[in-house]
Amino acid sequence: MLNIDRDLGRFRDIVKGKVRKDLKKYMSSGELIGRKGKNVVSIPLPQIGIPRLRYGENKSGVGQGDGEQGDGAGQGQEAGDAAGEHVLEVDVSLDELAEILGEELELPRIEPKGTKESMAERNRYKGIAQQGPESLRHFKRTYRRALQRTIASGGFDAERPVIIPIKEDKRYRHYVVEREPRSAAVVVYMMDVSGSMGNEQKEIVRNQAFWIDTWLSHHYKDVETRFIIHDASAREVDRHTFFHTRESGGTLISSAYKLCVEILTKDYDPAEWNIYPFHFSDGDNWSGSDTRACIELLKNTLIPMSNQFSYAQVDSQYGSGQFIKDLLEAFGDEEAVTLSRVPNRDAIMDSIKDLLGKGR
């Protein structure tokens, strides 16, 4: 058993090394997103198959005739003795994936603030009761009680020590249901879906959201996600709509920030929740006046109630890219604000480090 455990540990180390080596590829391609289960991700790893041995030269054999080579139909590829290329899928837990991400990008650990009363109830066994379900019967306590009763009644035979518990002898584990305070986080994803944000830009957003979720879930027992899309107006949507919607129109970024504030004010007390708004856009806003409105919303409301506000600007050939410059001018020295530019898929890894590197 020890050898098996040791071999399994070595195999897990090999898998982690492979994921770490190809982390940038996984982050840019989005290959892992569709393989995500509840607590694990199925990772495809190329493997070398065992070669098949050939015995003898096989110069002649049964069924040879006078025809030339290639006369018959179905001529195939010549057999070889090289190793075959195969793909092995290995399940890696999301916690392991987060650890790899943190080690490779040198991300600091997050220190959560505040706690909320968790909705998950926990059973704690705190004593012994005389009644309860048989599944909770305490064998030792029941046996001890039956033994004491048998000895006291003079019915104990040392030569044939048969102990038969009766109803009054039975003892059961007693538990109470407790609600324990746990650190919780809410992540609000906001995405510009105006005409300048194409499928490539949305795919970059999707990849980044996957890794952000993975990292934050590693640090919090409870993580809730909310999704906002906006063009000239904003609305809350589900996850599928967020990543698959096709819309167009102008852009009023302030509409997303206003809706985000409404959601957080209504459902998430900053004293109990760790709040992380993430906004993705190509940086093309409708007007300078709306940008000023955004800065006021951030400065007076959204940033003070959040652990961290993050903005990632995805390059688009149609977007002006001005918004990140305005945010940098207004919040360049603000510790609770992170800004990142994502010119293409290959920049996702660096952008993730920009967004998560403060450990807030």
Image (cartoon, rainbow, N blue to C red):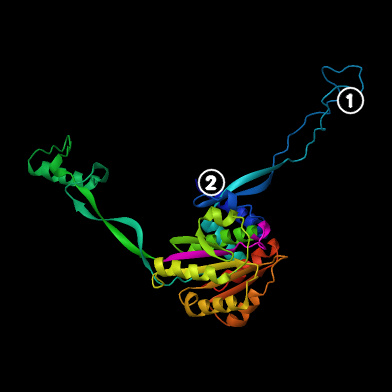
What are the residue bounds of the magenta stretch? 183-201
Front position in the image: 261 or 339: 261
Front position in the image: 296 or 150: 296
| Circles 2, 1 touching at the beta carbon (< 8 Å) | no
- Compared across the picture, whether 117 is left or right of 101 comes to left
Q: Give x and y (percent) for residue 8.
A: 55, 49
- Compared across the picture, whether 48 is left or right of 331 comes to right
Residue 305 highlighted magenta (yes or no): no
Q: Earlier in the sequence, mark 2 or mark 1?
A: 2
Of circles 2 and 1, the one toward us is: 1
Q: Which residue is mark 2?
A: 4
Residue 200 highlighted magenta (yes or no): yes
Q: Give x and y (percent) for residue 218.
A: 50, 62
Mark 1 Cα-neighbour bin, 10 Å: few <14, some 14–19, many ≥20: few
In the image, what residue type sits under mark 2? Ile
Of helix, strand and loop, which one carries label 1?
A: loop
Q: Give x and y (percent) for residue 207.
A: 61, 58
- Residue 13: quadrant of the picture: bottom right
In the image, what residue type sits under mark 1? Gly
Q: Which residue is mark 1?
A: 70
* Residue 252 higher or lower than 240, as above or below: below
Q: Give x and y (percent) for residue 152.
A: 8, 44
Residue 227 seen in this snapshot: no
Separation (CA) of disc 2 from disc 1: 50 Å
Front position in the image: 135 or 240: 240
Residue at (57, 79) in percent of width and height: 292
Residue 278 seen in this snapshot: yes
Residue at (69, 42) in percent of width and height: 86
